[in-house]
Amino acid sequence: MRCRFIVLLFTAIAFIDHDARADDTVVERIAFGSCAKQDQPQPIWDAVVAGKPQRFLFIGDNIYGDSQDMNVLRAKYALLGAQPGYLKLKQTCPILATWDDHDYGANDGGADYPQRRESQQVFLDFFGAPADDVRRTREGVYSAQIVGPPGKRVQFILLDTRYFRSPLKGIVNTSEPGEGFRGRYGANEEPGATILGETQWKWLAEQLRQPAELRIIASSFQVVADEHGWEMWGNFPQERRRLFQTIRDAQSAGVVLISGDRHLAEISRLPAEHTDGVGYPLFDVTSSSLNAPSRNFTKAGVRFGNELNSHRVGLTFFDCNFGTILVDWTPSDPVVRLQVRDEQGGVAMQQRVNLRQLRPAAK
């Protein structure tokens, strides 16, 4: 019996990340963002820091590396590391990070990127992962952390949507008047096509069973929006359904999704009846870019405009932006404010949600 207990304990510990140490800090202010051109000014950090975040989530395209030369990647990370505003952020709060394609090393890259192992170590070096961090010895930069006392626990889950991702399926670009420029990718429904890979899927299922009241799942590209034809979970419909089913099977309450990549910001909402049994609506707050916005650009003669997204709540924001999640634990039913903020820190859009709304209905 004692041996069996030790084995079970070891198994449980194996799924707890190195950075998931106990921390009873009550988290009320979370900030996040994506898409930062390292060789251009980044004045937005002043607004981020002014909000006094307790965690900042860097969720992809943290630099634009786009190289198989690790010296090039290191040099570009060094430019980010020298940004005055970023240095202030590091002094303000812990930074949690995952990557997207450009900091991974290849535009729209996936498992076929030949330098992914080397790039992973460069990423971990820049973000200060210690030598004994589990990400130093496993494939992929996914990580998780739980912060707060019982009743006020916030779980951060940062997915790796690059290391294991199967090839994208290309289609001919199309556009429709009034709906904007449609992207180049369609649905890959080949058997075995994946975004996360089996090891990360197993890890995610275990993380979603950890006790927490609010769970922030960071995906480098959008989960809920699935019509625009650029990179998104909708490119892999089976994986998108599997994500919802994994949340459902874990009976995991309090999930909020955040994403980047698009060089625009919007909030999307998937009604409970479309989430494969999750039991409550799923919000996806997309924040991009920190300093390289689309500003409603014209591409191939087509106005970008409000591209296809039937799940969008409100409008699209095209200027520099970052995201914030504010949690008021005071009421018996805590209030979560999902926000996109502009370069000066002003609220450009918001969705107000009570935690009770993010729980499956009692059966």
Image (spheres, helix red, strand yellow):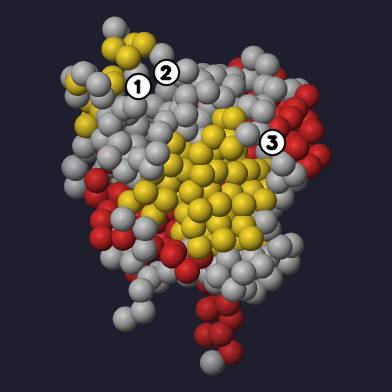
Can the viewer see residue 328 in this picture? yes
Residue 305, labelled with which disc? 1
- For residue 252, the mark is none
Residue placed most toward the observer, 108 or 260 = 260
Whether the residues at callouts 3 and 1 have beta carbons within 8 Å, the answer is no
**Residue 226 in the image: x percent, y percent?**
29, 39
In the rendered structure, are the residues bearing label 2 and label 1 in contact, judged by CB atoms less than 8 Å apart? yes
Distance from the alpha carbon under mark 2 to that under mark 1 = 6 Å
Residue 2 vs residue 304, the one in the foreground: 304
Q: Earlier in the sequence, mark 3 or mark 2?
A: 3
In the image, residue 289 above or below residue 7: above
Of 46 and 73, nearer the camera is 46
Which residue sits at x=62%, y=69%?
331
Horizontal arrangement in the rendering, residue 1 relative to residue 359 (left or right): right
Q: Which residue matches tag 2?
A: 296
Q: Amino acid at mark 3?
A: Val
Amino acid, disc 1: Gly
The residue tagged 3 is 48
Badge 1 element? loop
Q: Residue furthest bottom?
A: 1
Q: Is residue 5 left or right of residue 223?
A: right
Helix, strand or loop at disc 3?
A: helix
Residue positioned 68% across, 16% down in the render:
41
Say which label, 2 or 1, has the lower sequence index.
2
Residue 281: where, in percent of width, then height? 37, 58
Q: Residue at x 33, y 51 (%)?
A: 270
